[in-house]
Image (cartoon, helix red, strand yellow):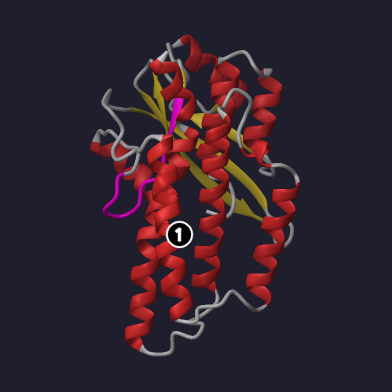
Amino acid sequence: MLSEPRSGRLAAWGNALLAGLVSPDDAVHAIVGEDAVHRVEGLPGETAPVGLTLALGRLRALGVTGYRVALPAAGHPLGLSGPPAFNARALDAEEAVVATGAAYGLVPEVYEAGPAGDVHVEVVWHCLPVRDAPPADVPSLGEAERELAEALWDATETLTRLDVAASGPVAEAALDAYRARALRGAAQTLAPGYPPRAVRVLELAQRIGLLISVAYENGHGGAVSASEMAARGEALRPVERVARRAQVAAYNAYVEERERG
């Protein structure tokens, strides 16, 4: 969770585009990011993949009024509403975008080519029908913020007791990358039109996600026994789940606020 999920970028900037707050070119540029190109496959009325600009315009014409994010994991269909075919593809990708106003969903498939340090990334978004139903297990922004604070406190206490430190070159590189991004401004983590609280929740969720990643990637730290390693995993899993829930709540805040009027 150190970097933004592609579904988050598409939902956030897609919502800003629907609201008329950004131009199509600016929205597509932000969604594509450092990837080479994004295309959409399976769009109604199209027999071949089309560019992202055309796809976003077509979805709007089909009745789409907003975009939500799903970040499912095994045993946790976070943000999904069915049907099973869409849920299975989203679970495999560990992310998806679910439209509101028209029953469509988008799941990314990533293709990489080229040598290390010069990887060419292309993304194909598969457009599939979805069930018009409330998304699974998505908290409100207020609930997400409270859950993050409680989970971070509990996990920090456990990890400190187990002496799981963030050290070494991998950890330092991850922390440096996070600090560099933070200096560019938290407001850039979401598109125009999102409430400040959503920006705050997303930034905290991503920071917690970074700490979890560092803890996992840094070997066993001081947790040398099997029981200590198991305790570390038990401490991290619920925090990781809470951080994913908070990310979804932040990305979905635009649609939630619009629906509340």
The secondary structure making up most of the magenta span is loop
Q: Position of residue 29 (x, y in %)?
A: 69, 31
**In this rendering, would 170 be left or right of 153?**
right
Hey, which quadrant is residue 179 in on the image?
A: bottom right
What residue lies at 59% left-to-right and 27% top-to-bottom? 13
Hey, which quadrant is residue 167 in on the image?
A: bottom right
Q: Is residue 115 above or below residue 187?
A: below
The residue identified by callout 1 is 152
What residue lies at 43% left-to-right and 30% top-to-bottom? 68
Closer-to-camera residue (80/200) = 200
Looking at the image, can residue 51 be seen? no
Q: Which residue type carries mark 1?
A: Leu
Q: Position of residue 49 (x, y in %)?
A: 53, 28
Looking at the image, can residue 12 be seen? yes
What residue lies at 68% left-to-right and 76% top-to-bottom? 169
Q: Is residue 28 above or below residue 155?
A: above
SS category of the residue bearing label 1: helix
Q: Tell me which segment is drawn in magenta.
A: 67-77
Q: Is residue 14 above or below residue 174?
A: above
Q: Is residue 69 magenta?
A: yes
Q: Position of residue 5 (x, y in %)?
A: 53, 45
Q: Is residue 164 magenta?
A: no
Closer-to-camera residue (204/12) = 204
